[in-house]
Image (cartoon, rainbow, N blue to C red):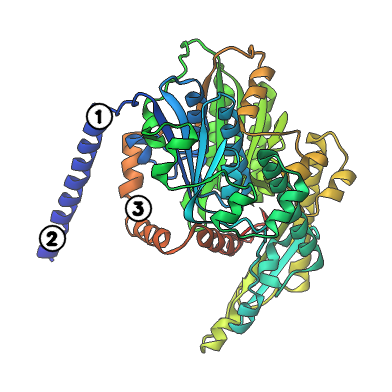
C-alpha cells in the first residue's frame, strides 16, 4: 500500500511539473515573441478551409495567436482595403462552411474589399456551390488545370432512424407542437411527412434562388442563363472557361502574370496578418459597444463543450448579459447568435436577462448560420433583428418525450422492473411508453410553453398571436423568408448590426467606438486548465475530429442532441436538422 501511494505521489509531482513547464513556456512565448512584419507589396492569402467559428473553440489558441473567426476574417479584409502594404487578396476557397449564413457574411466582406480597386483573385481547385459563391465575389476566378467546377445545384438530406430503432426494439415516444416541428421525425419516421417535405423543399428552393442571384450578378449573366449552366454541371476547366464561369485556367505559379497581383507577389497568410494589421486607435473614453456571443446548443449551467458539441450555458451567458447591463461605459449591445436552440427553460432564463438589458440600452440581434427555435427565442428581446438571407431561423415550436429502450434490453435477455411511490414517479420509465394520464400532463406543459412562445413573439414583433401562430408551427425559414413574414427586420451581417447599435445609441456614424466581446479572452490559467484538464475526454474528442468529416460530426451531434437532453424530461425548442445542403 505504501509503495502504491508513493507511485501516485511521483505521478502527481510529474504532472505538476509538466503543467508548470508548459505554463512558463507559454508565458515566455507570449511575452517575448515578435510577430513577423508585413512584406512590402504583400498579397493577403485567405484560405477558407472547413467551418468558420464565431468564437475560438480552443481557449489556448487565443494566447498564442489571433484566432481565425468570422469576425476576424471580415475585419482583416476591411483593414486590407485601406492598408497601403497590401496590394491585393488571393482567395482560396478549399472547403466553405456547410451552411449559408457565414458564406454570405464572408462574401459581403469580399465584395466590399473589391470596391478598393485592389485585385481580388480566387484560385479554385475543386469548387462546389458554396465554394464557387465565395469565389464569384472575386474580380478574377482561376481554376487549376486538373480542377473541377462542381456547380450542380442544391440537395438536402435528412436521416431517418425509425427503421433502425425498430430493429433494436427501441421506441421513440415523442410529442411535438407544430405541424413543421420535425426534429422528432428523425426518430419517429422512416421518411418525409408531407409537412416535412414541404418545408425542406421551400428552404432548398430559396437557398438555390439566392445562389442563382449571387452568381448571375457576379458573372453578369441572367438568372435563367445561370440555371441552365448549372444543369450542365459539373464542368471540367475548359468547359467552365468557355461558359464564362471562370476567367482563366492556370496553376498557382502562373496566376501573377495575368491577375494583377504581380509576377512575383509576396504571400501574407491571414493568420500572420491578424497579428500585424493596423488597429483602429480608440481613446480610453470612446463609447463602447458590446458583442455577446451565443454559440451552440442552449443548456442550463455553464455550458462549454459537451457531448453534443459547443453549448451555450444559461448561467455563463446571463452573467455576461448582466455585466453589459450594469456597465455604464457600454452604450449598446449586439447579441450574435449561432444556435439551433435547446432547453426551453434555459432559453427563457436568457430571454429574461436580455429583456432587462433591452430596458437599459439598445439591443440589436445579429444572426449567423442558425438562430432557430430556442435560438429565435433569445432573439426576441432585440430592438432590431438582422439576419443573412441564408440564415436558418424561426422554428417556433417545441417537442418532448423519451426513448423507450425496454425492448432493446429484452432482446439481449435483460429485464427492467421498478418500484415507485407517487402517481407520476415512473413517468419517464425507459421500459414502457407514456400512459394516457402521463401523456396528457406532458401535452399540457408543452402547450403552455408554446402559447407563451407565440405570445412573446407577437409582442416583440408588434403582431398578434393568431398571425404568429400561422407562421410558427415549428416551421424553419430562411432569413429572407423570415423578413418577408416579419420575423426579421433587416438582411445583413454583424457589421450592419454594429452600425445599427451605434446609431440607436446616439453615437455619430463616423465616431470611433470600442467593441468589447463576451465571452472575454481566457486567462492563462483558464486556457491551460481547459487544454490540459480534459484528459481522456479531450483525447476522444480529438480522435473523433480526425476520423469524422465536418458534416459527419454535425450529423452525429444532431442525432445525439435530443437523445441526451430528453433524459431530463424537459421540453426542447430545438431546430430540426438537415445534414447536408
- 476 or 41, which is in the foreground? 41
Q: Position of residue 504 (x, y in %)?
A: 69, 19
Q: How crowded is mark 2: few (under 14 residues within 10 Å), some or many (20 or more)?
A: few
Label 1 belongs to which residue?
33
- 255 or 493, which is in the foreground? 255
Q: Are marks 2 and 3 in contact (CB under 8 Å)?
A: no
- Left or right: residue 483 versus residue 568 is right
> Disc 2 on helix, strand or loop?
helix
Residue 483, by quadrant, is top right
Res 250 label: none
- Left or right: residue 244 versus residue 481 is left
| Residue drawn where x is 41% and y is 45% of the image | 252
Against 454, residue 159 (above or below) is below
Label 2 belongs to which residue?
7
Q: How crowded is mark 1: few (under 14 residues within 10 Å), some or many (20 or more)?
A: few
Q: Which quarter of the image is occupied by the C terminus?
A: bottom right
Against 431, residue 222 (above or below) is above
> Disc 1 on helix, strand or loop?
loop
- 106 or 239, which is in the foreground? 239
- Left or right: residue 107 versus residue 401 is left
Amino acid at each position: 500500500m505504501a509503495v502504491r501511494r508513493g507511485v501516485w505521489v511521483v505521478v502527481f509531482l510529474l504532472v505538476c511539473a509538466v503543467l508548470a513547464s508548459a505554463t512558463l513556456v507559454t508565458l515566455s512565448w507570449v511575452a517575448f515573441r515578435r510577430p513577423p512584419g508585413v512584406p512590402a507589396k504583400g498579397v493577403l492569402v485567405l484560405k477558407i478551409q472547413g467551418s468558420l467559428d464565431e468564437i475560438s473553440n480552443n481557449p489556448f489558441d487565443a494566447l498564442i495567436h489571433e484566432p481565425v473567426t468570422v469576425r476576424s476574417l471580415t475585419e482583416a479584409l476591411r483593414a486590407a482595403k485601406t492598408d497601403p502594404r497590401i496590394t491585393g487578396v488571393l482567395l482560396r476557397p478549399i472547403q466553405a462552411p456547410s451552411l449559408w449564413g457565414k458564406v454570405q457574411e464572408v462574401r459581403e466582406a469580399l465584395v466590399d474589399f473589391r470596391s478598393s480597386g485592389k485585385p481580388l483573385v480566387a484560385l479554385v481547385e475543386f469548387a462546389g456551390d458554396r465554394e464557387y459563391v465565395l469565389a464569384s465575389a472575386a474580380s478574377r476566378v482561376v481554376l487549376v488545370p486538373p480542377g473541377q467546377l462542381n456547380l450542380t445545384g442544391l440537395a438536402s438530406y435528412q436521416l431517418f432512424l425509425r427503421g433502425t430503432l425498430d430493429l433494436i426494439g427501441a421506441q421513440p415516444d415523442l410529442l411535438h407542437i407544430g405541424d413543421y416541428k420535425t426534429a422528432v421525425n428523425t426518430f419517429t419516421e422512416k421518411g418525409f411527412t408531407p409537412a416535412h417535405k414541404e418545408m425542406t423543399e421551400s428552404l432548398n428552393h430559396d437557398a438555390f434562388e439566392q445562389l442563382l442571384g449571387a452568381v448571375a450578378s457576379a458573372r453578369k449573366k441572367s438568372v435563367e442563363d445561370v440555371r441552365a449552366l448549372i444543369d450542365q454541371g459539373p464542368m471540367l476547366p475548359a468547359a467552365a472557361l468557355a461558359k464564362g464561369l471562370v476567367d482563366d485556367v492556370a496553376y498557382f505559379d502562373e496566376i501573377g502574370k495575368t491577375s494583377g497581383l504581380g509576377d512575383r507577389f509576396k504571400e501574407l497568410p491571414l493568420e500572420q496578418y491578424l497579428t500585424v494589421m493596423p488597429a483602429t486607435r480608440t481613446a480610453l473614453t470612446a463609447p463602447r459597444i458590446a458583442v455577446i456571443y451565443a454559440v451552440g446548443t442552449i443548456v442550463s449551467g455553464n455550458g462549454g463543450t459537451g457531448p453534443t458539441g459547443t453549448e451555450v450555458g444559461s448561467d455563463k451567458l446571463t452573467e455576461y448579459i448582466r455585466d453589459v447591463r450594469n456597465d455604464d461605459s457600454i452604450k449598446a449591445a449586439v447579441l450574435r447568435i449561432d444556435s439551433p436552440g435547446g432547453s426551453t427553460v434555459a432559453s427563457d432564463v436568457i430571454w429574461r436577462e436580455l429583456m432587462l438589458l433591452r430596458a437599459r440600452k439598445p439591443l440589436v440581434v445579429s444572426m449567423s448560420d442558425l438562430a432557430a427555435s430556442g435560438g429565435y427565442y433569445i432573439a426576441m428581446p432585440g430592438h432590431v433583428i438582422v439576419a443573412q438571407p441564408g440564415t436558418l431561423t424561426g422554428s417556433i415550436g417545441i417537442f418532448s418525450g423519451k426513448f423507450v429502450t425496454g425492448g432493446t434490453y429484452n432482446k439481449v435477455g435483460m429485464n427492467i422492473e421498478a418500484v415507485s411511490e407517487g402517481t407520476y414517479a415512473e413517468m419517464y420509465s425507459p421500459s414502457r411508453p407514456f400512459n394516457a394520464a402521463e401523456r396528457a400532463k406532458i401535452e399540457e406543459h408543452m402547450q403552455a410553453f408554446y402559447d407563451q412562445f407565440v405570445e412573446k413573439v407577437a409582442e416583440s414583433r408588434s403582431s398578434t398571436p393568431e398571425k404568429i401562430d400561422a407562421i410558427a408551427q415549428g416551421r424553419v425559414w430562411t432569413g429572407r423568408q423570415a423578413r418577408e413574414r416579419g420575423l426579421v427586420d433587416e438582411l445583413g451581417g454583424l457589421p450592419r448590426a454594429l452600425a445599427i447599435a451605434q446609431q440607436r445609441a446616439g453615437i455619430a456614424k463616423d465616431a470611433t467606438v470600442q467593441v468589447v466581446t463576451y465571452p472575454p479572452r481566457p486567462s492563462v490559467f483558464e486556457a491551460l486548465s481547459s487544454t490540459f484538464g480534459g484528459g481522456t475526454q479531450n483525447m476522444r474528442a480529438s480522435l473523433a475530429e480526425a476520423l469524422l468529416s465536418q458534416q459527419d460530426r454535425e450529423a452525429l451531434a444532431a442525432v445525439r442532441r435530443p437523445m441526451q437532453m430528453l433524459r431530463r424530461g424537459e421540453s426542447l425548442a430545438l431546430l430540426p436538422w438537415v445534414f447536408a445542403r
